Image: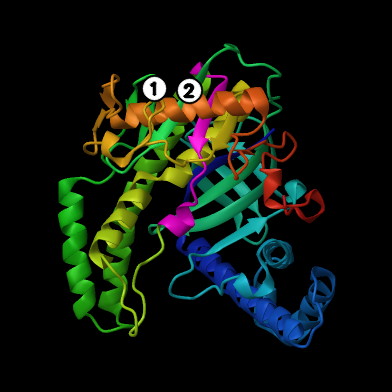
Amino acid sequence: MLTGRKYRLNLTPEQEALCEEFGNVCRAVWNTALEQRREYRRRGAWMTYVPQSAELTEAKREFEWLSLAPACILQQTLMDLDRACRNRGTFKVRWRSKARWTPSFRFPSRNRIQVERLGRKWGRVKLPKLGWVRFRWSRPPGGEIRSATVSRKSGHWFVSFLVDDRAVTPEQHAMPNTAVGIDRGVKVAAVTSDGDFYDRAFVTDGEAARYRRLQQRLARQKKGSANRRMTIKAMGRIMGRVAARRGDFCARTAHRVTQRNALVVLEDLNIRNMTTAAFGTLAKPGRNVAQKRGLNRAILDKGWHRFEVALINAARYTGTTVMKVNPAYTSQRCFACGFVTEGNRESQAVFRCKAPGCGHRDHADVNAAKNIKAAGHAVSACGDLGVSQSVKQEPVSRATGRNPSNGESPSHSTR
């Protein structure tokens, strides 16, 4: 199956300047092609990848700066735009802003990518127009390299290889009769129905204080100034470390959960809508804006979506089924007797059933996780929850490692 391997690059000043230039050219091609597609849609017509690719070839004869970047990464940029427009709609695809977009470009030709190991800690990869580039050999690629993506994050450049590791998803899990429900929360990142609590702090107190000082400094600096750019880079380095810890936590936790369980049940949460700002309008101001902002930050800090993606990825190697069920009343329903009321949850952590003759007590998140697991078993038995919203089950394609439920067609895959 297809998987990713990411390594930190050690670029020379000349290679770093070339990567910056390649990123700027790709950003210009993306924005120009997107504006062309939107203009065609306003006229009631369509623009697709094939004519845009032909026009790009003609434009390279007129504008020399387009020839600075390899042709394969420009063609790949148009392919990525074509897929984004097909999946989300032309007017919902975002521009690539110079201030907000981080440079990224992909080399899709496997026959033009060569990887060699130089020693215990270093390797090198040969890429078109960049030549041999050294990278930190943290692990072997472990398979046939299909493509390479160069990107910059937190002031450092990385290369990500798409690798075919020849692994096959098992037809059956090693422990086929095991199942677990997981409740994602803002106090504890993940709580299982078995009573396991998975959580960690992603930012230290010192980093939080320094980041707050940098935000205050940024507010006083002039836009476009060199000092402002330095402050933004310093903030990015802190957030880069935080994101790396969050990704490591999600990957480790997902590996442990999928190794032990053949069925993993999650709540079907619309995280994008849950983290929408509550500003409102002048005529109707938003309510509880500060509280909603704090809740949004807590949800995003725990990495709910990233954990879900990590589970789906890890499930490919163990044969685990990842299922999502209706989240309605999972935190208010008593697992012992089924009684539902808001008063059952006395606090964030304490659950005590108010039904006469029950009095069931448990940790609130563990009780919710048990209800989620029970809902998953009900779906497995009868195919639906008996409510208006049907379950969503997330299959994973063995060929591409992607979720086919997002409408992505293999014919439009850029990998």
In what quadrant of the picture does the N terminus appear? top right
Of residues 120 and 29, the one nearer the viewer is: 29
Position of 261 relative to 403 (above/below)? above
Look at discs 2 and 1 and give the one toward the viewer.
1
Residue 165 place in picture, x, y as percent: 67, 30
Of residues 60 and 97, the one nearer the viewer is: 97
How many numbered dots are placed on residues in this image? 2
Q: Earlier in the sequence, mark 2 or mark 1?
A: 2
Position of 392 relative to 154 (above/below)? above
x 26%, y 84%: residue: 222
Asked if one can make out residue 273 in the rendered structure from this viewpoint, the answer is yes
Residue 288 place in picture, x, y as percent: 26, 65
Looking at the image, residue 377 sits to the left or right of residue 181; the answer is: right
Magenta residue span = 260-274
Looking at the image, residue 68 sits to the left or right of residue 61; the answer is: left
Q: Which residue is disc 1 drawn over?
A: 337
The tag on residue 20 is none
Crowdedness near tag 2: few (<14), some (14–19) or many (≥20) residues, C-alpha within 10 Å: many
* Disc 2 residue type (three-letter): Val
Quadrant for residue 161, please give it.
top right
Quadrant for residue 223, please give it.
bottom left
Quadrant for residue 117, please give it.
top right
Q: Which residue is disc 2 drawn over?
A: 180
* Disc 1 residue type (three-letter): Cys
**Cα distance in 3D space between marks 2 and 1:** 20 Å
Looking at the image, residue 60 sits to the left or right of residue 24; the answer is: right
